[in-house]
Image (cartoon, grey):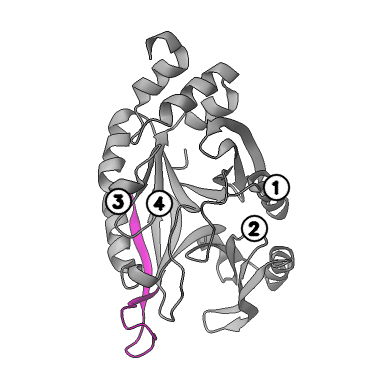
Amino acid sequence: MQKIIPHLWYDKEAVEAAQWYVSLFEDSKIISSSTIPDTPSGDAQTIDFQLAGMRFSAISAGPYFALNPSISLMVACSNAEEVDRLYASLSADGTELMPLGEYPFSKHYAWIQDKYGLSWQLMLVGKIEEHQRIRPSLLFAEDACGKAEEAINYYLSVFEGSNKGYVNYYKAGEPMDERAKINYSELNIRGNQFIAMDHGFGGDFTFNEAFSFMIPCEDQEEIDYFWDKLSFVPEAEQCGWVKDQFGVSWQIVPENMNDIMANGTKEEVKRMTEAFLQMKKLDIAALEKARLFPQER
């Protein structure tokens, strides 16, 4: 099972966006969808989907958080035509952050924010077989600027079986923001490739709950472990959500929770929802009791 699942928050467009993304990439499909009833946002629609073999999840839960370029999806392309195809689709009605063209790090590259707000970096790469097709890219800006290396080392300590890859540092005097240290870095967390870098040239955006990372856990011990390691902002703790010391949001959940919400009976889903809405850290035993035995809650 994929250990870290990117999770996207939309106002009302989660299903529409997921279906569109699936149409653009190979080895992609809708996995399941469900409705979480009677949340503070009303009935929230969720959808699980796969892009280029990588699992994602998304939710339509109101206009509380907005996607921004602090976390983007970097797409490795083997030829310029592939970059052009994705650029044409993803830039339509979107925003151009770095125009399509040649750069020192890639002969054909563009950074865009699509019509739903999700940011994409489209890059022609050599040795395509060495790259994961889609890699989440974390840009440490504002208060988090200069903390990319600290974050990399911390995440590697939290997730066993992970390792650091290529790291490139800013040269002296190169970044506008003197706090910036890492220009580009790669890390592998439990088989998932990530990119991290400091924003050396300003930027008024930073991490928020619109782009979070879901960690499916097999038991309560694993939930407790990741909760202790990743929760640094007590006021952000709610319904399995935490925020780490760098501002990145995580969802620490039972590995079967999405399946139950997608395939459980209407009554089971309602009872599960009522139970987890009252929790901060999720309690697997209490959730299972709520699902099966309403009279014993």
Residue at the disc numbered 4: 249
**Mark 4 or mark 3, earlier in chain:** 3
Marks 2 & 1, CB-CB < 8 Å contact: yes
Q: Is residue 170 magenta?
A: yes
What is the C-alpha distance between the residues marked 2 and 4?
20 Å
Disc 3 marks which amino acid? Val
Disc 4 marks which amino acid? Ser
At x 69%, y 73%, the residue is: 80
Disc 1 marks which amino acid? Glu
Q: Position of residue 295 (x, y in %)?
A: 42, 8
Is 260 left, or right, of 47 in this rendering?
left
Residue at the disc numbered 1: 16
Nearer to us in this view, 94 or 135 = 94
88 above or below 56? below
Residue at the disc numbered 3: 233
Q: Mark number for residue 116?
A: 2
How crowded is the residue under tag 3: few (<14 C-alpha within 10 Å), some, or many (20+)? few
